[in-house]
Amino acid sequence: MRSNPHAKRDPVPLKYARSMLQVAEAQGYNGAELLRSLQLPIDPLSPSADLDSPIDAQYYSQIYRRVMWLLQDESFGLGLRQRTPAGSFRMLSLFIIHCETLEQALRRAAEFIVFCRTLSDVPSAARRPVERLGDGTAFYRFPSDVELAESDDTIDQRYTMAHTMAIWRRFCQWLIGKPLELIAVHMQASAPDNPEYFEHLFNCEIHYGREHNAFLLAEHCLDCPLIHTEESLRKFLRDAPYHLLVSQDDDDSSLLSQMKRIVGNDLSHEFPSVVTMAENLNMSVRTLRRRLKDLGTTYQQFKDELRKEHALRWLNQPELKINAVSALLGFDEPSAFHRSFKKWTGMTPGEYRASRQSPHSAEKSA
């Protein structure tokens, strides 16, 4: 019998499934009844549930799709003034995935959002979404509180805006394959009674009572290349947006994130052995292999994925020759890099670079 190629998916922490059920409950739906209707072999609402235990992403996806269908809204229960019809995020992602830089993606995303808002009775004030300030910094502006938040309560508006900005930051980080470091966050709302929550959410300075809701970031961040393709976007969308809902701390504490930090950004040297990696993580090799198995991967697959991630990023920098990228990745021979890259992506490094430089020509030949 032929196996389903999509049957095995990356696991996700059970707490993300509980989070989606809580979104439904906040809108008046019974989470327990919703779970029973799906007939899943998990119970994220159980008081004894281990919220950090991994579950198959297909279970999470089933919960997500049902909640989005019930709410007829892809806005994750944020309380936005304008509902987000199902499929909107996919269309936005396809609209920007072939952009070369983060700045191009941000501008095109703003264009898409403004167009969608013209189809409804929700006004959208004209403004520059991206502005280089000429001092090495730049602004990325969001809609105003009154444009975005459904509630007229200033506290609700503040939380809606903050969570919307945090989700968008995580999406940008996925697009460029690395953290989007912020100098500061500007918010129109007045300072809250508990500023620590917002400081923890963004991990940078927050200035309240400002003219715009905006990210203040280093100008060079706008020039970061997008590292993904339609193929990797399909996987991202298939597994649903739990990537966008997790906090930065969750990302930083995951096993794979810890392993990435141990390896570092210099892949030209030899990878640490599985024994060395286990020692750095203060666990036995057997435990490390078991935990990787629970995540649906192996140590070799982790190394391959990390090399692939860096290869995609460096190939988007045209000033780097392909042989230089091969050396940066620690390959002794460029031919070995070519074979590995084709195994990872189905393309040679040269074909991938050409597709990123001329996306429209690839569409015409499809």
Image: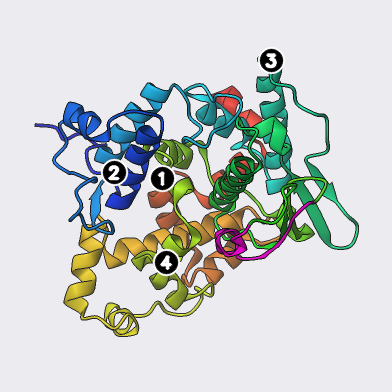
The answer to which of 148 and 61 lies nearer the viewer is: 148
Q: Secondary structure at mark 3?
A: loop
Residue at (88% x, 54% y) in the render: 133
The answer to which of 24 and 130 lies nearer the viewer is: 24
Q: Are marks 3 and 2 in contact (CB under 8 Å)?
A: no
Q: Are marks 2 and 4 in contact (CB under 8 Å)?
A: no
* Distance (Cα) linking label 2 and label 1: 9 Å
* Distance (Cα) linking label 3 and label 2: 37 Å
In the displayed structure, 224 sits above or below 205; it is above
* Distance (Cα) linking label 2 and label 4: 19 Å
Q: Which residue is mark 1?
A: 242
Question: Mark 1 vs mark 3: which is more N-terminal?
Answer: 3
Residue 218, image x, y percentages: 76, 61
Residue 68, image x, y percentages: 40, 27
Q: Are marks 3 and 4 in contact (CB under 8 Å)?
A: no
Question: Mark 1 vs mark 4: which is more N-terminal?
Answer: 1
Q: Are marks 2 and 1 in contact (CB under 8 Å)?
A: yes
Q: Which residue is mark 2?
A: 57
Q: Is residue 48 left or right of residue 345?
A: left
Question: Mark 3 vs mark 2: which is more N-terminal?
Answer: 2
Q: Which residue is mark 4?
A: 257
- Magenta-colored span: 193-209
Kindly identify which numbered label has been placed on residue 156.
none
